[in-house]
Amino acid sequence: MRRNRIPVQLVWAVVVICLLPSLLNLLGVDFGSPSQTFDVLVSNITKDKVIDVMHHTLSGSFTHTILEWSAFCTAIFTVILSLIHFYLKADVVTPIIGIALFSSGCMDAFHTLAADRLIQGVADNQNLIPFTWAICRLFNALILLGGAGFFLIAQPVRWKRGISLVVLSSLVFGVIAFWVVSICARSATLPKTIFPNSIVTRPWDIAPLLLFIFAGFVVFPRFYNKYPSLFSHALIISVIPEVATQLHMAFGSKELFDNHFNIAHFLKIIAYLVPFIGLILDYIRTYREEADTAKELKQAMGVFNSILSESR
């Protein structure tokens, strides 16, 4: 079982990364994007100056786009690697992470496109971004729990080599993700999700927080015990940044692009990156085992040939 665990150094590295932003906050470092308003008189300044002021005003939106798109790219790379891994080894763990991360990545991508007005909509960003964020996080937690729970019950033999099922499920969940975000973007009114004067500033983020905690303490450990691998253990470790992400949002973020908002988006990238690292470590171990087997076979062949030569 120990050989199927992520190295303890990597686990501690994830913990340190999750704690580091808060520690830097205590030292006075603020990760929030500067808040500026576009209140200049266009008639009194040049066109280049207007563009420059607009870029400064939208710096928070740019940061949000970069962070969300980085998370999306990480999810896509993990999906591609997990599908290849599943095709080669028929491992039942990989389609779960593949479907979940692909779906979550699609949600993140469509959420970002809607916030940047690349998806047509009427909702105001002050309500659209936090609401679709909460929906994305809830979707992420539910699909991970649903996938792991399903394969805890189902017989794994029936699903081996079911690459077509994995691809089809990913496409279906991708369409669902686009549909949900599109509805939110086109809604004239969305529920209020930020309460800056409350202890819980974003109550909509409490549900994903509780689901991730439940997954980390109950579902994922059982899943790992049934299907031990570096990949399934990485799924447990990924709960650490997932929970840290939700804590920053639910109890810290009071407005768009503030300190805790940006920290949460960064930690979500780490949460997506951990399963990717687990897959890479699994590939490295498989390569080393095959190399060791080839070396042992070569040595055995050498001994056999020497014995055969002596007998002659």
Image (tube, rainbow, N blue to C red):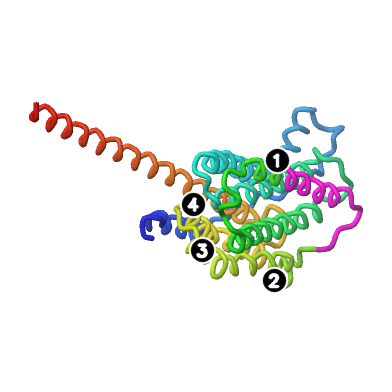
Q: Secondary structure at mark 2?
A: loop
For badge 3, the amino acid type reads: Leu
Label 2–label 3 contact, CB within 8 A: no
Can residue 189 be found in the magenta stretch? yes
* Pointer 4 or 2: first along the chain: 2
Q: Earlier in the sequence, mark 3 or mark 4?
A: 3
N-term mark: 1 or 2 = 1
Q: Which residues are magenta?
A: 171-192
Q: Which residue is mark 2?
A: 200
**Residue 52 lies in what quarter of the image?**
top right
- Please tell me which residue is depicted at 26% across the width and 36% down the height of the picture: 297
For disc 3, the marked residue is 26
Front residue of 171/154: it is 154
Name the element at disc 1: helix
How packed mark 4 is, by other alpha carbons closer than 10 Å (few <14, some 14-19, many 20 or more), is many
Q: Regarding mark 3 in the picture, which secondary structure is present there?
A: helix
Instruction: Determine the image quadrant of residue 149.
Output: bottom right
Q: Quadrant of the C terminus?
A: top left
The residue where tag 1 is placed is: 56
Q: Classify 44 as above or below 230.
A: above
User: Which numbered dot is residue 231?
Assistant: 4
